[in-house]
């Protein structure tokens, strides 16, 4: 019995490691290498890598952008907003637990990118909320997104559109309290 528990723990641990590694790409394992090789944007002391936009079904009103933002510089920066031609509104969001319900809300005052650290925007965490979509985000396409940083200024990114496997962000269970926000596409 003990043996099987250990085995189970080991499996969980391995899974956790895999999940962490995967978190960098914010997507299913098959996509990570593809994303990480796509680009590293360096601008104003920041390095942005593994950017992606979540693919959407037709007529979905919202999507989300994910990426890793590293700040090897001596100065803290702050992601304060963004814009995109394909979206009427772009916000920086965070997910928080309210009891058992995961909710999202704009990050007040912007998202700090501390000096010497990296911040992951990923499903179930911080994300770029792309609202009032004017078109479908189809897998295999790319979209331009401009991010505004306090120090680095405007940074334009070209993000690949990819499906996000785990569905943490738009999962039905967690979005029961978010009908208006994430929209009807989550069933
Ligand atoms: Cu959001």
Image: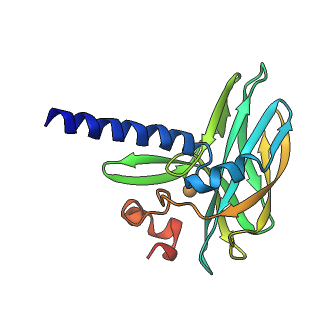
Residue occupying image coordinates x 68% and y 70%: 139
Residue occupying image coordinates x 72% and y 75%: 134
Does 45 appear above or below 56? above
Position of residue 9 in the picture relative to residue 91 (left or right): left
Can residue 150 be seen in this snapshot?
Answer: no
Q: Position of residue 121 (x, y in %)?
A: 61, 45
Position of residue 39 in the picture relative to residue 10 (left or right): right
Q: Looking at the image, in which quadrant does ligand 1 appear? A: bottom right
Q: Position of residue 38 (x, y in %)?
A: 78, 50
> Which quadrant of the view contains residue 24?
top right
Please identify the residue farthest to the bottom as the structure is shown: 58
Q: Position of residue 174 (x, y in %)?
A: 39, 59
Which residue is nearer to you in this view: 31 or 177? Answer: 31
Can residue 47 be seen in this snapshot?
Answer: yes
Please identify the residue farthest to the top as the structure is shown: 74
Which residue is nearer to you in this view: 88 or 50? Answer: 50
Residue occupying image coordinates x 86% and y 33%: 44
Position of residue 114 in the picture relative to residue 168 (left or right): right
Residue occupying image coordinates x 77% and y 22%: 75
> Which quadrant of the view contains residue 62?
bottom right
- Indicate how the structure is coloured in the image: rainbow
Which residue is nearer to you in this view: 37 or 138? Answer: 37
Does 77 appear above or below 165? above
Placement of the C terminus among the 4 image quadrants = bottom left
Which residue is nearer to you in this view: 52 or 17? Answer: 17
> Which quadrant of the view contains residue 54?
bottom right
């Amino acid at each position: 019995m003990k043996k099987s528990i250990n085995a189970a723990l080991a499996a969980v641990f391995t899974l956790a490691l895999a999940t962490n590694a995967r978190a960098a790409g914010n997507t299913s394992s098959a996509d990570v290498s593809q994303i990480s090789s796509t680009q590293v944007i360096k601008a104003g002391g920041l390095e942005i890598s593994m950017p992606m936009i979540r693919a959407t079904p037709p007529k979905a009103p919202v999507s989300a952008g994910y990426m890793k933002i590293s700040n090897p510089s001596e100065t803290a920066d702050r992601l304060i907003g963004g814009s995109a031609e394909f979206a009427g509104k772009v916000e920086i969001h965070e997910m928080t637990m309210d009891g058992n319900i995961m909710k999202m809300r704009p990050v007040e005052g912007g998202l700090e990118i501390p000096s010497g650290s990296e911040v992951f925007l990923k499903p179930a965490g911080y994300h770029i909320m792309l609202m009032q979509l004017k078109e479908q985000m189809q897998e295999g396409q790319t979209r331009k997104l401009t991010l505004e940083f306090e120090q680095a200024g405007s940074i334009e990114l070209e993000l690949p559109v990819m499906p996000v496997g785990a569905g943490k962000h738009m999962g039905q269970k967690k979005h029961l309290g978010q009908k208006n926000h994430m929209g009807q596409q989550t069933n």
